[in-house]
Image (cartoon, helix red, strand yellow):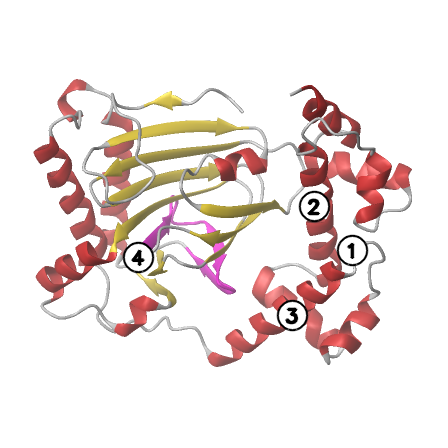
Amino acid sequence: MLPETALTAHEPSAGLDAASAGGTATESVDVDSHAQAQSGWSLEYDQLTAGAFKGRFECLQLPGVRLVREWCNRGVRQRGSLDPDSYGFALAAKPTQEFRFHGRASQGDSLMAGCSDELDMLCPPDFGLIAMVADAPLVDVMWQHTHGSQVPAWLRGQVVTRLPVAQATRLRDLYSRIFNDVDKPPARLDDPDRAVYLRDSVLACWLAGMPADPAGDTPPTLALRRRLVERACEIALAESEDPLSILELCRRVGASRRKLSYCFQEVLGMSPVGYLRAIRLNRVRRDLAHVGGRPKSVGNAAARWGFWHLSQFSLDYKRQFGELPSATLRRSLTA
């Protein structure tokens, strides 16, 4: 991972209730390092498309609000939780980009919003996003000022809704100015009043374009398909050393092969075999990268996740991550 670069004179605080403002920018060449750069959050990233990973994570901490700009060159699935008692909002950095949020295929100016205690997002290669995580009391007050009503119940779930094009453009332009200018003297945030003013301006910009009653609620059928996919993944990964055949997996979840494949394609955009293979490769990489100086062999790590043909495994691993598994292990043992 490349060195962390401070954007202001302050380091960001771990929690959103900090009174000070500050930020960091981190560049990573490993998907796990990229996840770990997001201080104070519990996130796990799995790399789903092949090739060496590169990522960038920029964070600006304001009082009660964290602003984020993120980019990855490979397709990833990110899951986990952010700050408690807060709301998260996110938008693709480019209006042409497609993604999946809690199983729902979305694109362009679709806004992702909801409680930040759960996150499940699939991002394609070369995907960037802008995001904000804000304390719930701040959102409550700003929503009242903006819409003249209480925060709606739908915001406590996970929803995708369409922003007006002009509002999405304003948000992207605002983030570009903030992250490009925050380290310049006119935009420095040492002054608490200036930090609060910026926080309120960004929060108002996010909420201004949000409908009081969105048409983007997740259909019940999609929720059922997502539960089926999660159950299939749970069963398949529990049998890590001896992977189940697709037919046996279908039998255990009580679905036909056609139905299971359809659900995986709709929810994850991948086939069951392709997705589960990518996840098992990620698990091997995680084992090799975090041995902590303890003796471990590539063969043992591969076998633990059901890869018994080492020559083919090494080829698949290099294709997926851009290096041989022995290189990942060697770097971990010498760290």
Q: Nearer the viewer, residue 53 or 244?
A: 244
The residue range painted magenta reads: 86-107
- State the residue position of label 1: 240
| Dot 3 alpha-carbon crowd within 10 angstroms: few under 14, some 14 to 19, many 20 or more | few
Is 219 placed above or below 200 here? below
Please say if the residues under marks 2 and 4 sit with CB atoms less than 8 Å apart: no
Q: Nearer the viewer, residue 271 or 3?
A: 3
Inspect the image, locate mark 2, and give the three-letter code of the amino acid beneath it: Arg
Instruction: Compute the Cα span from label 3 to label 4.
Output: 27 Å
Residue 94 point in image, percent of width and height? 39, 45
| Dot 2 alpha-carbon crowd within 10 angstroms: few under 14, some 14 to 19, many 20 or more | some
- State the residue position of label 3: 231
Q: Residue at x 26, y 25 (%)?
A: 10
Q: Residue at x 64, y 21 (%)?
A: 335
- Tell me the element at label 1: loop
Instruction: Compute the Cα span from label 4 to label 1.
Output: 35 Å
- Which one is earlier in the sequence, the residue at label 3 or at label 4? 4
- State the residue position of label 2: 283
Inspect the image, locate mark 1, and give the three-letter code of the amino acid beneath it: Ser
- State the residue position of label 4: 87
- Which one is earlier in the sequence, the residue at label 3 or at label 1? 3
Q: Quadrant of the N terminus?
A: top right
Residue 142 point in image, percent of width and height? 14, 57
Inspect the image, locate mark 4, and give the three-letter code of the amino acid beneath it: Tyr
- Which one is earlier in the sequence, the residue at label 4 or at label 1? 4
**Left or right: 25 in relation to 237:** left
- Tell me the element at label 2: helix
- Tell me the element at label 3: helix
